[in-house]
Image (cartoon, rainbow, N blue to C red):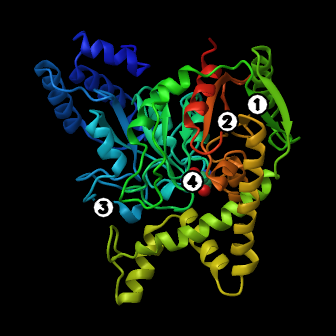
Amino acid sequence: MQLSNYENLRSRLIAHSITCEEVVRFYLDRIDDYLEDNIYITVFSEKALERARSLDRKLKEGGRLGKLFGMPMAIKDNIAIKGERLTCASKILYNYECVFDATSVIRLEEEDAIFLGKTNMDEFAMGSSNENSAYGHIPNPFDKKRVPGGSSGGSAAAVANGLAMVALGSDTGGSVRQPAGFCDIVGLKPTYGRISRYGLVAFASSFDQIGVLARNCDDAALVLEVIAGKDRRDATSSFHVVPEYSSEMATLSVEGLKIGVPKEYFPESLNADVSRRVKGKLFELRDRGAQLVDITLPDSAYAIAAYYILVTAEASSNLARFDGARYGYRSENAGDLAAMYVNSRTEGFGREVKRRIMLGTYVLSAGYYDTYYKKAQQVRRVFQERYQEALEKVDVIAGPTSPFPPFGIGDKTGNPLEMYLADVFTVPASIVGMPAISVPLGFDSLNLPVGMHLICNFFEEGKLLGIAKRIQVPL
Ligand code: GLN
């Protein structure tokens, strides 16, 4: 069964040449074949089939067909689906069952999407390789000895291996874009505030955004259109009108496009293969009529430093609620109240999460607040100003998604700082809150995927997706 794009699936469903039930069975069988890859944490076998049958009935009875009618989707396991387990790939939430739906989940359901299950991730979305999960690591779809990226590694591997057509992930510093780049698919992080965060477990609230992982830009655009928009349950969600992304994309032309190429995104240390692929694509775009404009931006290394101060600060506060009393795991060893808190957290959280809580409480402590937290906020402001200035001169900023191709499982687990550098090109867009996307460029000399990273101005998702589409599929 060839199901690589939604438009094609939809027309076959409507023509009755295939049923939703058959589609779901096909995906469930594939999920079964990949069980040992730890891609899903929970699979909704029965529920997905039931849902498929009810959609089949609706089609037969001539009901309104939603925009995503029959689209088989996977949801990262830090997004709430009522009545289902939500683990954040952490032991501390191993038995937590959601009592409400995330807003994006409600919106997808209203448009007739089908959920196949919840995907594996780095614990509480902290990581770049999916190795920080209490549910095992995931092999890269193109080389089993390498990582799929993270923290939305399960969502990326699900889409790349054909275990879901589209998946939701979350992106705080690159967790949708980096795994998309490592798995040869499209990964979109919208403008901060474009999608409601209600029902997304908070890691760093001023950075977190739900994002979309898909095989192509049209599918990503369609899903974005459904989930974007104001939500009264999230005060940071934007009133900005949600356009019809497909028509914005259709009018985009490479001819005359001004592509900003920051030298900071092509440092000496950049992997040679990655550099060659990305530059090759830029030259191709120039040949197709785009204009390449050299620009300078603040060094991304400062973005990484500021990012890890700000997100750990926010995480240390957000994760205070997991105390053994309210949610999930409680230590057996809970003699008195203090022991219950301490032991539940000590036993329930993994190493990386604990490292970040400690870093976060440190940078927020009275004696260091001005030195670290306040400074990092100032750096964030400088980045915001400089990126906005740059985007007054160019339409889009381009560079590689990751400084290196997918790395080996275990290669960076012993050195957190090296792991943090995996996000050096994705973090700036998160710091400034602008929309960004990773587009697949094909494979390097070792047959590993290379992704190109694009950033547009606030709320220019239509343009961003349009450019990405022209890169993926030249007209
Ligand atoms: N890898 C980055 C981190 O560990 C980004 C994570 C994310 O975007 N959720 O913080």
Q: Which amino acid lies under the numbered mark 2 shown in the image of this protein?
A: Leu
Q: Marks 4/2: CA distance?
A: 16 Å
Instruction: Name which residue type carries label 3.
Output: Tyr
Mark 4 or 3: the one toward you: 4
Residue 114's place in the image compared with 197, above or below, is above
In front: label 3 or label 2: 2
Q: Are marks 4 and 2 in contact (CB under 8 Å)?
A: no
Residue at the spot x=68%, y=54% of the render? 420
Query: Badge 1, how many Cα within 10 Å: few under 14, some, many 20+?
Result: many
Marks 1/4 in contact by CB < 8 Å: the verdict is: no
Q: What residue type is disc 1 on?
A: Ile
> Looking at this rendering, what residue extends furthest in the right direction?
268
Vertical placement of residue 11 versus 471, above or below: above
In the image, which is nearer the foreground, mark 3 or mark 1?
1
Sequence-first tag of 3 and 2: 3
Location of residue 168 with respect to 324 vertically, above or below: above
Residue at 79 percent across and 21 percent down: it is 280
The quadrant of the image that shows the C terminus is: top right
- Report whether the residue tagged 1 is closer than 8 Å to ligand 1: no
SS under mark 1: strand
N-term-proximal mark, 1 vs 4? 4
What is the distance, in whole Å, between disc 3 and disc 1 at their CAs?
46 Å
Total number of numbered discs in the rendering: 4
